Amino acid sequence: MPDTAPIVARIEDELRELAADGLLRRRRVLDSPCGPECVVDGRPVVSFCSNDYLGFANHPELIAAAQAAAAQWGVGSGASHLVSGHLRPHEEAEAALAEFVGFPAAITLATGYMANLAIVPTLVGRGDAVFADRLNHASLIDAVQLSRADSHRYPHGDVAGLSAMLAASTAKRKLILTDAVFSMDGDIAPLPQLCELAERHDAWLVIDDAHGFGVLGESGRGTLAHFALPAHPRTILMGTLGKAAGVAGAFVAADRTVIDWLVNKARSYIFTTAASPILAATVTKSVALIAAADDRRQRLRRLIAQLRGGLADTRWRMPPSETAIQPVIVGDNHEALRVADALFARGLWVPAIRPPTVAKGSARLRVTLSSEHTEAHAAQLVDALRALA
Ligand SMILES: *Cc1c(COP(=O)(O)O)cnc(C)c1O
């Protein structure tokens, strides 16, 4: 018997090709909790990788909330939400989230990826049309495919282009789909104009606020609040709970009718076990901490200004971003990798993002800041990048 089946050998070949192109992915093991200072494969480093923008992933009050919830509710929910897995902590988390973002109702899901798969195919289907920003997150792209609706992708942030596409469409139902804060560039979608277009064309507007929730807007209510846009029956807001909220999971906030529809129809909500009640209870506590975290958001803004000021005159471009995501565009794949490796050797961990995640020729270091970085951490990164540029 040959030691490798041909069907496996083919994958081995492809893995070897990835390695030859410098595209093989590997995982580094953290020997510490998530935080600005962490231990990676036994080595202390300053991390600029995580989406834990407010430093809540290892917050003592959230750890205490999780411990108390485990003691009271156990570790597992035991079933899906529609069977017997919808526990009091889930119900309370939904109410807290809906109230916080100012929508009539909300549901929680196990991950943001699953939340997007719940929203799009439940609102549109064959013969309908989705209008999606070209730089949308992979989970939104997959959600459109799963819906079987016609997919129209408009150039990044191009309101005029989108407007023309909507006007030309004869689809019965239309849905505009966008990241609120774009995950690889950190820039903010033109939500006021998108709301207006949704209104004019009687379209759904689905907003993925994975990176704005907790960070932007009054009390960290998110990108809609950043623009002072109120809830609207045609607007569906998705937010994730594993980034600024520091826990795990996601929520969808919308009109009560839309939430009832999702509960009845969304397959990635119905056919999966409800998240642990520990997570639900911890999320409720996290929402309270987010609301009270103006000091953390202010520290984050100061660090953003420090980083951008410090790198303003290097040969690497930093596209405009007022969020915690601060890309440094290096351009060439191999150079981006070399810079990331050189930073890591200096104890600074910054991921190099390459195509196909970003456009060809725009390989970058994706720096993410947390309110818990110190001025000294940011200065260290600025100095190292200046030396390498
Ligand atoms: C992280 C992310 C998601 C996925 O959320 P998870 O909870 O990590 O599955 C969805 N959309 C965007 C824009 C994201 O950045």
Image (cartoon, grey):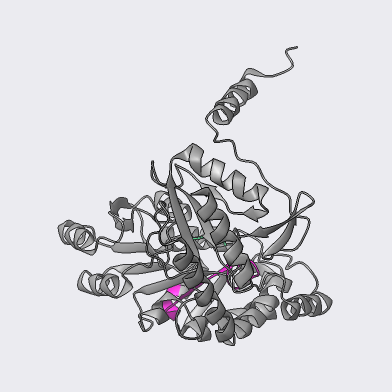
Q: Position of residue 104 (x, y in %)?
A: 46, 84
- 316, 323: nearer the viewer: 316
- Of residues 38 and 335, the one drawn nearer to the viewer in this rendering: 335
* 276 sits left or right of 101 in the view: right
Query: Which residue occupies 47% across, 49% down?
Result: 364
Task: Check if residue 275 falls in the magenta segment.
Answer: no
Q: Residue at x 29, y 61 (%)?
A: 157
Location of residue 295 (image quadrant)? bottom right
Where is residue 5? Give x, y as percent: 67, 19
| Residue 373 in sight here | no
Is 238 or 255 nearer to us in this picture? 238
Q: Is residue 13 visible?
A: yes
Residue situated furthest right in the rendering: 71
Q: Nearer the viewer, residue 326 or 101?
A: 326
Q: Is residue 203 left or right of residue 41?
A: left
Residue at the image position 72 percent from the left and 60 percent from the top: 38
Residue 32 image-quadrant placement: bottom right
On the rendered structure, is 304 left or right of 68?
left
Relative to 314, 13 lies left or right: right
Residue 141 in picture, x, y percent from top left = 42, 52
Q: Does residue 322 sit above or below 319 in this rendering?
A: below
Region rendered in magenta: 242-258
Residue 333: give x, y in percent of width and height.
47, 39
